[in-house]
């Protein structure tokens, strides 16, 4: 029976990549650095493998990158408001540093979207006027983060009973068990 829920979460995650406007395109990404404070931000789901490894893009100078270097355990939260479906993912993040991979994906980014990775100052730097952000012409700070999940929780809010299933990765296989919502 749990297989039905596994298939649904797989399909919805894939739609986050392929279907414009799908709510799983944007997800809440949480890291915890040495300050032991959870930091959350909305990121865009860029790639999903058959193993459910998720990839996002970021500026390598961002706090999320330094947090991952300090503690690579991360959490992701996705919510589909029409289906009342929440997916919570826990996993290990790694920063993709292979120059050939980065070049391949950098070349696939639309020119107007590249501005996110070419600011002269790092993300989070205080500025006096948002209209005065300056950009580099010949350099970028594009980076990719890949998350390998080890636990995924599926929660479907419905009546008469909510359904909650925990999927845990054991080696290369996923085990599952129902939980009380």
Image (tube, grey):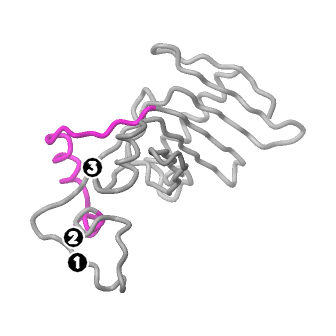
Q: Do the residues bearing badges 2 and 3 touch, measured as CB atoms within 8 Å?
A: no
Which of disc 3 and disc 2 is earlier in sequence? 2
Task: Tell me what residue is drawn at x 61 percent, y 34 percent.
Answer: 8
Residue 44 left/right relative to 39: left
- Locate residue 173, reporting x and y percent: 50, 15
- Locate residue 48, reporting x and y percent: 41, 38
Under circle 3, the secondary element is: strand
- Rendered image quadrant of residue 1: top right
Which of disc 1 and disc 3 is earlier in sequence? 1
Under circle 1, the secondary element is: loop
Residue 149 left/right relative to 145: right
Q: CA distance from mark 2 to mark 3?
A: 16 Å
Q: Which mark is residue 120?
A: 2
Q: Which residue is mark 1?
A: 134
Task: Tell me what residue is drawn at x 72 percent, y 48 percent.
Answer: 84
Task: Tell me what residue is drawn at x 64 percent, y 50 percent.
Answer: 80
Q: Which residues are magenta?
A: 92-116
């Amino acid at each position: 029976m749990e297989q039905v829920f596994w298939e649904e979460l797989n399909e919805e995650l894939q739609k986050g990549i392929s279907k414009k406007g799908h709510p799983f395109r944007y997800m809440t990404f949480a890291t915890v650095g040495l300050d032991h404070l959870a930091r959350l931000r909305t990121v865009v789901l860029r790639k999903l493998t058959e193993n459910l490894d998720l990839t996002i893009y970021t500026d390598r100078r961002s706090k999320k990158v330094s947090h991952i270097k300090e503690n690579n355990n991360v959490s992701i939260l996705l919510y589909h408001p029409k289906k009342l479906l929440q997916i919570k993912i826990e996993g290990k993040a790694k920063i993709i540093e292979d120059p050939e991979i980065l070049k391949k994906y950098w070349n696939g980014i639309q020119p107007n979207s590249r501005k996110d990775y070419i600011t002269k100052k790092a993300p989070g730097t205080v500025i006096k006027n948002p209209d005065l952000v300056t950009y580099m012409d010949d350099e970028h700070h594009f980076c990719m983060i890949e998350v390998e999940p080890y636990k995924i929780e599926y929660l479907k809010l419905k009546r008469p009973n909510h359904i909650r299933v925990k999927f845990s990765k054991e080696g290369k296989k996923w085990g599952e068990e129902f939980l009380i919502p």
